[in-house]
Amino acid sequence: MQKYQKFNRLIGIFFSIFLLCVSTPGLAQQQRLNFISEVKGKVEILRVGRKKAQQAFPGNYLNSADKLRLAQGASVKVSCDNAVTWIIKSSGEFEISKGCKYTDRTVFTRPEANTSPTRAGNDSRIPYLISPRNTAILNQQPTLSWNPVKGATSYRVQISGGEVNWTTNVDKPMVVYSGKPPIKPGVFYEVVITANNGVSTKNIDEPTFFVLSESDIHQVKTDIAQLQQQPLSDESKTITLAHLYRSKDLNADAIDVLNKLVKGGSKTTAVYQFLGSIYQHIGLNLLAQERYLEGLKLAQAEKNLEAQASIQASLGEVEVLNQPRHAIQRYQASMAIYQALGDEEEVRRLQQKLSSLK
């Protein structure tokens, strides 16, 4: 076990350095997010720096300098970064900055790059925490769930942080925190889970969670109320709600609402791609891989090239630790699609990653 832990830490350090070296500058910073919610008819995106227009799909991120081109009879709904919906129903070209105008109020932000990967989310032998994991929460009595370990019949769960040092034993991979002592806003709480076969997350996986302040919770509720008034379909509202949650670091809540769409049989590529990105961000690579693969199939079926390219690159990132050869193939596939789209910047970025791996 000690050798495994040491190896795990070394790999984590190596991969963190790798990501920092090859990531695009500024990715870790919060950036405003505009995205397409609904599309009807022929709508294309004209991206700055690309030689070719691409078909628009729900979930596409939009930069302020990008343009949308609508054919006769087409329409599109764009969720702007301030949570207001911009609806275009006429033909022509429209610059995003003209419809999603800059304001001091930002609700949606772009996902941050994951610079703290862990091997725990790749190892089914470990009772790694699934929820709430590396997230803010709204509830002071969260339900904890973790990966069930084969052969284990009970688990010891410990939550520590601030004045809390709570321990309990359960026979299922789930428990509700008692609420005593109370967890306080702004304090990071660490969770350690130990199976009765001796396998523990201690020194291997150290996820945390924290409760939002009362003022932040009030703002989230205000934003949700505004979102519910937007002229969007139920699925689009759910995806938009997930963006709101993720923008507030409420990763667990974002995952919950997106998984409800999955269980309901959603066939929207963006749902699976978004879920994969959140799982990847919080260090659950196996679950990220599963959702990315589902999203890739949907993207291929609808010939959504940008989603295919992005998902292939993301799969490369989650597979690089355990399947480096597969990761190289993923990056190569992504690069080929970006070349077809005429995106030279993404091609260069992927070439850097491939050079680092090789």
Image (cartoon, helix red, strand yellow):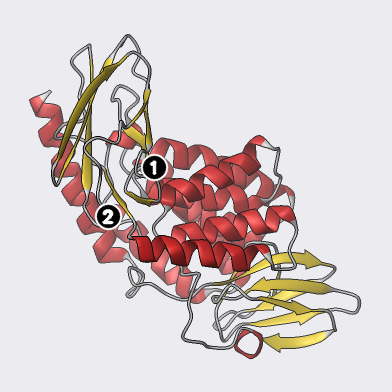
| Viewer-closest of 157 and 47 | 157
Which percent across, then down, holds residue 74? 85, 74
**Viewed as shown, does residue 106 lie left or right of 181?**
right
Q: Quadrant of residue 119?
A: top left
Which percent across, then down, holds residue 202? 16, 31
> Tag 1, which secondary structure?
helix
Question: What label sits on residue 319 in the rendered view?
Answer: 1
**Viewed as shown, does residue 305 lie left or right of 353?**
right
Where the N terminus falls, by quadrant?
Answer: top left
Question: What label sits on residue 27 in the rendered view?
Answer: none
Within 10 Å of disc 2 (Cα), the crowding (few <14, some 14-19, many 20+) is some
For badge 2, the amino acid type reads Pro
Res. 330 visible in picture: no
**Viewed as shown, does residue 156 lie left or right of 251?**
left
| Viewer-closest of 289 and 250 | 250
Q: List the residue tagged with mark 2.
A: 185
User: Which residue: 36% across, 70% down?
Assistant: 27
Q: Quadrant of residue 204?
A: top left
Give the spatial CA distance, label 1 vs label 2. Answer: 35 Å
Which percent across, then down, holds residue 339? 56, 68
Q: Is residue 284 above or below residue 314?
A: above
User: Which residue: 74% across, 53% down?
Assistant: 302
The outermost residue toward the bottom is 98
Q: Is residue 73 above or below residue 166?
A: below
**Is tag 1's residue or tag 2's residue first in the polypeptide sequence?**
2
| Viewer-closest of 83 and 220 | 220
Q: Are marks 1 and 2 in contact (CB under 8 Å)?
A: no
User: Which residue: 25% across, 63% down?
Assistant: 20
Q: Is residue 140 above or below residue 64?
A: above
| Viewer-closest of 205 and 12 | 205
For badge 1, the amino acid type reads Glu
Q: Quadrant of residue 55?
A: bottom right
